Image (cartoon, helix red, strand yellow):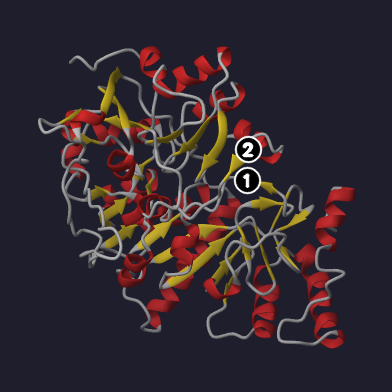
């Protein structure tokens, strides 16, 4: 009780140049008031920090910290418009990182040590360990390695959340053992995050709900992508490659993922399982419908209506949902062992299957790679989806060459647009190009892409034919004229 204080008093603990670790993963389980108070303090004082989180924060926290000048460096993921602009202007340094790696680098002492951790909790146990709220993210690592810890106890989250989490921390090298998960429903850890009670520097009470997820209703394009994917899965079952239960599913956040997952409700698939990063509205819809039997992730990011449904009926879901640290939910070995079907979103991809999921025009960061790379390289099926064209078809999302590569052709099995689906497994680059052009490209651009490939193959040859002086001509044309046509 001696540690209970206000957010403003807790914010005085930060010093210029500190490294701060904060809970929060896709707007869930993040600091609601302490970082906000730090932003207000930075408006009056010269103070800059390096901020590490699990993923993105809610309640405009990143924007407030950016506007106040409090951020010197940010990692490993963000979705905030104000912060994004500051990063692209060179005002804030950003480390775009696979989400499975941040905790590893901290434990291996390859990153600066954490001075202060700010962790949201539902309650503190008698031994000082803390029960997280709606996400785990990197909080286990921050609690273990930070010199001081500020705990935000959020009374908006019911104490009945106790038991929803599976807290497991792998041993440090060279003494690491096997992570004993062979199915998404396996629970292997404890229910709370261990914490040396002597490191608690402040306790702040809040009663603020997570920022709601940005849920957009499915449109014609996302529904078309979902139909192509469901038909593909049905064909895989007929071929004997999969059963009607499929394999554990991972889906990135957003309306495309929600549309694909929602499509399972009216399908013949059943007893589905999820091994992912984020549980969205569509996850709980599938659990309610009986189509999904279990879901494992690192956070719950849902609409207000879904939030109310879940947290007023937690007992209904606690045996079928688990939240884990992101270095468990995203660990490559488990993804490979479980045979995860990974469905993620691309900004653009090229005719050979290279995917750009982070940069606009090869220069400006959008959000970050997130966990897509953790899953893409190690999945049983690595699937990327995007619309074929956008902005009145002035932009083609299938190109001669991507302007930035996040996922190479070696890590991509299936590409899907609203036009169609390209199965790239077992195909050489020249075969891949033809399948992608024939199945995924918007009609307005198909002839031009076919011409590029034909001329590249004839004039330059090679294993992966390209005309380098034309490879980025579409991007240049859009920059100069406002259209790739």
Measured as percent of width and height from the top left, residue 321 is found at: 24, 49
User: How many numbered tags mark residues here?
Assistant: 2
User: Eyeballing the image, is 361 above or below 474?
Assistant: above
- The quadrant of the image that shows the N terminus is top left
Could you tell me which secondary element the residue under label 1 belongs to?
loop
Q: Which mark is residue 84?
A: 2
User: Eyeballing the image, is 237 above or below 284?
Assistant: below
Relative horizontal placement of residue 297, taking residue 445 as reference (left or right): left
175 and 421: which one is in front? Answer: 175
Residue 122 seen anywhere in this rendered image of the structure: no
Measured as percent of width and height from the top left, residue 34 is found at: 40, 21
Q: Residue at x 83, y 72 (%)?
A: 468
Q: CA distance from mark 2 to mark 1?
A: 7 Å
Relative horizontal placement of residue 76, taking residue 87 as reference (left or right): left
Q: Which mark is residue 461?
A: none
Residue 214 seen anywhere in this rendered image of the structure: yes
Relative horizontal placement of residue 213, taking residue 414 as reference (left or right): left
Tell me which corner region of the image, top left, top right, bottom left or bottom right, holds residue 212: top left
156 and 307: which one is in front? Answer: 156
Measured as percent of width and height from the top left, residue 22 is found at: 39, 35
Relative horizontal placement of residue 275, taking residue 26 as reference (left or right): left
- Find disc 1 in the rendering and name its residue: 366
Q: Residue at x 49, y 66 (%)?
A: 229
Q: Are marks 2 and 1 in contact (CB under 8 Å)?
A: yes
- The quadrant of the image that shows the C terminus is bottom right
316 and 11: which one is in front? Answer: 11
Q: Earlier in the sequence, mark 2 or mark 1?
A: 2
How dense is the environment of label 1, judged by Cα within 10 Å: few (below 14), some, or many (20 and up)? many
Measured as percent of width and height from the top left, residue 283 is found at: 35, 49
User: Eyeballing the image, is 273 above or below 55?
Assistant: below
441 and 463: which one is in front? Answer: 463
Could you tell me which secondary element the residue under label 2 belongs to?
helix
């Amino acid at each position: 009780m001696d540690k209970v204080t206000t957010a403003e008093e807790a914010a005085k603990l930060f010093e210029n140049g500190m490294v701060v670790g904060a809970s929060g993963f896709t707007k869930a389980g993040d600091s609601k008031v302490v970082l906000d108070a730090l932003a207000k303090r930075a408006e009056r004082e010269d103070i800059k920090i390096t901020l590490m989180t699990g993923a993105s924060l809610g309640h405009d926290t990143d924007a407030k910290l950016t506007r106040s000048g409090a951020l010197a460096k940010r990692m490993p993921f963000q979705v905030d418009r104000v912060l994004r602009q500051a990063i692209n202007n060179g005002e804030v340094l950003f480390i775009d990182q696979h989400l499975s790696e941040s905790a590893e680098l901290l434990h291996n002492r390859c990153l600066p040590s954490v001075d202060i951790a700010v962790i949201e909790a539902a309650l503190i146990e008698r031994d000082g360990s803390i029960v997280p709220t709606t996400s785990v993210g990197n909080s286990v690592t921050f609690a273990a390695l930070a010199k001081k810890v500020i705990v935000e106890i959020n009374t908006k989250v019911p104490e009945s959340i106790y038991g929803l989490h599976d807290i497991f921390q792998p041993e440090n090298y060279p003494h690491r053992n096997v992570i004993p998960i062979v199915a998404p429903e396996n629970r292997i850890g404890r229910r709370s995050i261990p914490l040396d009670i002597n490191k608690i520097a402040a306790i702040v009470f809040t009663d603020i709900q997570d920022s709601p997820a940005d849920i957009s209703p499915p449109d014609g394009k996302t529904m078309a992508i979902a139909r192509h994917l469901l038909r593909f899965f049905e064909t895989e079952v007929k071929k004997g490659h999969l059963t009607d239960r499929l394999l554990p599913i991972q889906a990135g956040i957003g309306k495309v993922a929600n549309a694909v997952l929602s499509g399972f409700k009216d399908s013949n698939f059943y007893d589905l399982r999820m091994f992912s990063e984020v549980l969205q509205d569509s996850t709980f819809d599938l659990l309610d419908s009986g189509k999904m039997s279990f879901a494992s992730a690192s956070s719950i990011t849902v609409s207000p209506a879904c939030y109310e449904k879940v947290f007023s009926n937690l007992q209904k879901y606690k045996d079928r949902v688990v939240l884990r640290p992101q270095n468990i939910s995203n660990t490559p070995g488990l993804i490979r062992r479980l045979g995860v079907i990974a469905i993620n979103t691309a900004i653009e991809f090229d005719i050979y299957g290279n995917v750009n999921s982070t940069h606009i025009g090869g220069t400006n960061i959008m959000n970050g790679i997130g966990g897509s790379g953790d899953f893409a390289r190690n999945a049983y099926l690595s699937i990327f989806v995007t619309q074929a064209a956008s902005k009145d078809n002035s932009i083609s999302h299938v190109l001669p060459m991507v302007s930035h590569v996040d996922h190479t052709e070696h890590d991509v099995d299936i590409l899907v647009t609203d036009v169609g689906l390209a199965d790239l497994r077992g195909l050489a680059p020249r075969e891949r190009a033809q399948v992608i052009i024939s199945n995924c490209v918007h009609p307005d651009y198909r002839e031009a892409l076919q011409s590029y490939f034909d001329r590249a193959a004839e004039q330059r040859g090679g294993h992966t034919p390209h005309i380098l002086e034309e490879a980025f001509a579409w991007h240049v044309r859009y920059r100069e004229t406002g259209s790739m046509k």
